[in-house]
């Protein structure tokens, strides 16, 4: 039997010499230009970082390509970020511009730092998931083609994080993003009694429903769903293959805004629902790209410097947000889940 | 676009300036039938607006309970090469730092056994190797083990923990995120590789309150670096910022301070911080990294309970330990994690995350189990209802 539990490669063997030498001794950094950072150590050593967006789904040929670039310009070291960016770590200042020229020539987008849109984190979608309500890579590609200028340039009031999850499982925490794109189902699961009997633990499926919509069906030795209570989260399907709910007409995309993770200025915030449904329109999802661009640009032209999407909305009020963006306010935006009443307004001080 | 293309919809995603995953799939498909059939099945999904992957299936490698996600095509006759197309989660090095020869080794192994497609990286932080048939799993793992790559987590186990770049390249880092991550990953190998919990459990580590790995939103245990003493100020650098004109210190730094604890003397170009009132949000440090730095008495705030919506709604982690020193061998932290896991294991229902359990049984029960004193730092605001409990012991007759 092969060895087990030996753990990941030790990071200490993965660090470039300049980092090994100055580990924990970084003094300050500068944002040189979009996508380029300079970190300076107590020792005076300099480390330039050139950040490049990737599509997240990459071939081994791509990995070898970027290895070759790192070998040529960075002594054979590179790193990835928490948002699927690739970072070239350059300790020789003379190599920075040649590296940038090379990356530009080869079509690698440089950016994603400072007051820009960073690389969207996203999930698998139709490529490799069994519960998606939309694709992931396709939507992200369409959105970032459209918003490309905001990745490569500093044209925004603050940092903007766009994230996508293709169902409510939300691999990758999109629920605290400036703009979250979330795949949703809109139809109740269909029940295949034979599959339920053969493949599902009935008590576990019942317990998996957050609204208590699932009840035993003793006659069929199966389950029933109370359609009026079901809000299509899909957790029953995760527990039980006999309850599929994906549907080409039912599935689509919802848009959430104003979330943040960092505690800078204001505490972290959840993203809030502003568009309950847009259709799945592959390959380029124009309804989604238009909606995201509208939200980003309305924020960009109205917010103050350093004001994240959610901070801007807190200042102007949600009624003004809907007014400025022209997004229609629909009944789905009013919460009716567990802590709903916390979101209702109890003051007559609102804006017209 | 070729006229006889079998993927006319996906071909459209090869255009435009953002890197194209379709181009990557085609590169792999030139040399690999699995990638070719994956492309075909995805085109079908784009056409039909629905996914074609079957529900789950238990596959794995010897000695492990997780780390491989079973995946079968719903259209195996049409796309036989992806009839079985399982995913490896491969534990990445701390901070996603790589030496290129290590990555090249991994590419060689994956080209030999799998689809030549990967995610760099998945949401948990793992390297995702996207697609191999059942009979390739064990040989592929054996080859990976030979070059020093182990599996990450999946299912009801400790998921692969991740951390920010930390002291590797960030002057904000208040804790050694890379070392802490490596240390606890090695410590909890059994919990990572053999699902034994009510549901998944995540640990994410950020070096400062900017929280670059989104720990507060998605991890049962969020570790966020902070400090207890004074922000370090270099007044010479403050003066340079004042002269430089790139930022307006009064308007952009002082006026946006959430606690109003800063004063800028424009005449003398000096900055004063009333540290007692500072809540260490990072805004001023983010804007003036040459002049301002976190203090020297560093450690972490431990927050607990964060998660995405399934099952009972999304939660952000709550402050449970306002300050903990974080130095090797990290015993206090490890004891904390073990104790919380034990309570969760004992009381949690199936598919109930730690935050949901705390919501169900009450913070009071959790703090009692953890033997932690209540502190105002734990809450945003005290309760507004009169429905609270007393321990009979506390009520003296």
Image: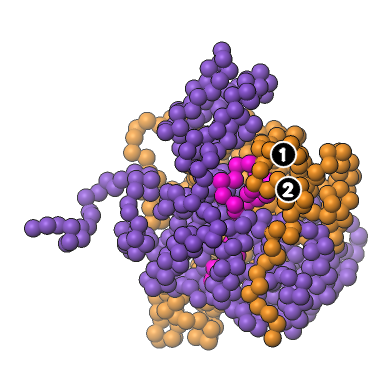
Residue A43, numbered label: 1
In the picture, the quarter occupied by the C terminus of chain A is: top left
* B15 left or right, relative to B395: right
Q: Looking at this view, is A326 or A132 the one in front?
A: A132
Q: x%, y% of residue B69? A: 64, 74
Identify the residue at image location x=45%, y=32%.
B275
Q: Does residue B170 show up magenta in the picture? A: yes
Q: Looking at this view, is B198 or B282 the one in front?
A: B282
Give the quarter of the image for residue A295.
top right
Q: x%, y% of residue B98? A: 75, 58
Q: Chain coloured purple: which letter?
A: B
Q: What chain does mark 2 sit on?
A: A
Q: Is residue A139 visible?
A: no
Q: Does residue A321 show up magenta in the picture? A: no
| Label 1 secondary element | loop
Q: What chain does mark 1 sit on?
A: A
User: Image height check: is A11 above or below B206?
Assistant: below
Identify the residue at image location x=63%, y=23%.
B236
Tags 2 and 1 touching, CB below 8 Å:
yes
- The residue under label 2 is A21
Q: Badge 2: few (under 14), some or many (20 or more) residues near its Cα, within 10 Å?
A: some
Q: Is residue B156 visible?
A: yes
Q: Looking at this view, is A178 or A266 the one in front?
A: A266
User: Image height check: is A148 above or below A252?
Assistant: above
User: Disc 2 versus disc 1: distance between alpha carbons?
Assistant: 9 Å
Q: Looking at this view, is B228 or A119 the one in front?
A: B228
In the picture, the quarter occupied by the N terminus of chain A is: bottom right
Tag count in the figure? Answer: 2
Q: Badge 1: few (under 14), some or many (20 or more) residues near its Cα, within 10 Å?
A: few
Q: Which hue belongs to chain A?
A: orange
* A224 left or right, relative to A74: left
Q: Which residues are magenta?
A: B157-177
């Amino acid at each position: 039997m092969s060895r087990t539990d030996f753990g990941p490669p030790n990071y200490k063997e993965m660090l470039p010499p300049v980092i090994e030498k100055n580990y924990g001794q970084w003094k300050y950094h500068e944002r040189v230009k979009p996508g380029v950072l300079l970190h300076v150590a107590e020792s005076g050593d300099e480390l330039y970082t050139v950040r490049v967006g990737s599509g997240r789904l990459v071939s081994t040929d791509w990995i070898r390509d970027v290895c070759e670039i790192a070998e040529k310009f960075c002594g054979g070291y590179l790193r990835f970020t928490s948002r699927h960016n690739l970072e070239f770590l350059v300790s020789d200042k003379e190599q920075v511009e040649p590296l940038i020229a090379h990356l530009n020539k080869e079509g690698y987008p440089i950016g994603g730092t400072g007051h820009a849109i960073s690389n969207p984190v996203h999930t698998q979608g139709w490529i490799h998931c069994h519960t998606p309500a939309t694709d992931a890579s396709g939507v992200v590609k369409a959105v970032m083609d459209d918003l490309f200028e905001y990745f490569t340039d500093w044209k925004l009031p603050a940092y903007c994080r766009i994230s996508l999850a293709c169902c409510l499982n939300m691999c990758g925490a999109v629920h605290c993003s400036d703009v979250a794109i979330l795949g949703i189902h809109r139809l109740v699961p269909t029940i295949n009694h034979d599959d339920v009997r053969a493949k599902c633990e009935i008590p576990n499926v019942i317990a998996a429903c957050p609204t208590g919509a699932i009840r035993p069906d003793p006659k069929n030795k199966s389950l029933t769903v109370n359609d009026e209570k079901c809000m299509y989260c899909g957790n029953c399907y995760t527990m039980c293959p006999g309850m599929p709910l994906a549907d080409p007409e039912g599935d689509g995309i919802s848009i959430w805004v104003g979330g943040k993770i960092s505690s800078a200025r204001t505490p972290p915030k959840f993203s809030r629902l502003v568009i309950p449904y847009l259709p799945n329109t592959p390959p380029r999802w124009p309804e989604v790209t238009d909606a995201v661009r509208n939200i980003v640009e309305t924020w960009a032209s109205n917010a103050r410097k350093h004001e994240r999407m959610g901070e801007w909305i807190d200042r102007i009020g949600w009624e003004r947000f809907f007014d400025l963006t022209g997004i229609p306010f629909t009944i789905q935006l009013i919460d009716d889940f567990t802590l709903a009443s916390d979101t209702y307004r109890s003051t007559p001080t609102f804006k017209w | 676009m070729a006229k006889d293309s079998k993927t006319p919809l996906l071909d459209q995603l090869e255009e435009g300036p953002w890197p194209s995953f379709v181009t990557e799939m085609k590169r792999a498909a030139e040399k690999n039938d699995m990638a070719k059939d994956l492309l075909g099945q995805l085109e079908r999904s784009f056409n039909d607006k629905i996914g074609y992957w079957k529900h789950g299936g238990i596959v794995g490698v010897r000695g492990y309970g997780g780390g491989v996600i079973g995946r079968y095509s719903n259209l195996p006759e049409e796309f036989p090469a992806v009839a079985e197309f399982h995913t490896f989660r491969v534990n990445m090095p701390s901070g996603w730092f790589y030496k290129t020869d290590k990555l090249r080794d991994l590419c060689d192994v994956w080209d030999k056994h799998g689809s030549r497609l990967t995610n760099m990286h998945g949401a948990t932080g793992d390297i995702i190797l996207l697609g191999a048939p059942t009979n390739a799993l064990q040989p592929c793992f054996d080859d990976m083990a030979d070059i020093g790559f182990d599996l990450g987590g999946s299912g009801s186990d400790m998921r692969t923990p991740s951390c920010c770049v930390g002291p590797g390249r960030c002057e904000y880092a208040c804790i050694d995120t890379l070392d802490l991550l490596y240390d606890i990953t090695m410590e909890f190998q059994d919990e990572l590789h053999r699902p034994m919990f009510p549901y998944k459990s995540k640990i994410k580590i950020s070096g400062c309150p900017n929280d670059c790995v989104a720990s507060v939103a998605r991890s049962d245990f969020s570790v966020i670096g902070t400090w207890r003493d004074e922000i370090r100020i270099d007044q010479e650098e403050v003066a340079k910022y004042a002269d430089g004109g790139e930022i307006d210190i009064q308007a952009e730094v002082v006026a946006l301070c959430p606690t109003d604890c800063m004063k800028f003397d424009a005449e003398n170009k000096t900055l004063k911080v009333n540290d007692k009132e500072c809540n260490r949000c990072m805004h001023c440090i983010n804007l003036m990294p040459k002049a301002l730095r976190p203090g020297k008495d560093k450690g972490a705030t431990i927050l607990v309970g964060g998660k995405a919506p399934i099952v009972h709604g999304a939660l952000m982690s709550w402050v449970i330990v306002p300050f903990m020193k974080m130095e090797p061998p990290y015993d206090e932290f490890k004891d904390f994690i073990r104790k919380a896991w034990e309570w969760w294991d004992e009381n949690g229902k199936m598919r109930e995350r730690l935050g949901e359990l705390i919501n169900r049984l009450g913070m009071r029960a959790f703090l009692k189990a953890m033997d932690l004193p209540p502190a105002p730092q734990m809450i945003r605001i005290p309760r507004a209802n009169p429905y609270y409990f007393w321990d009979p012991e506390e009520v003296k007759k």
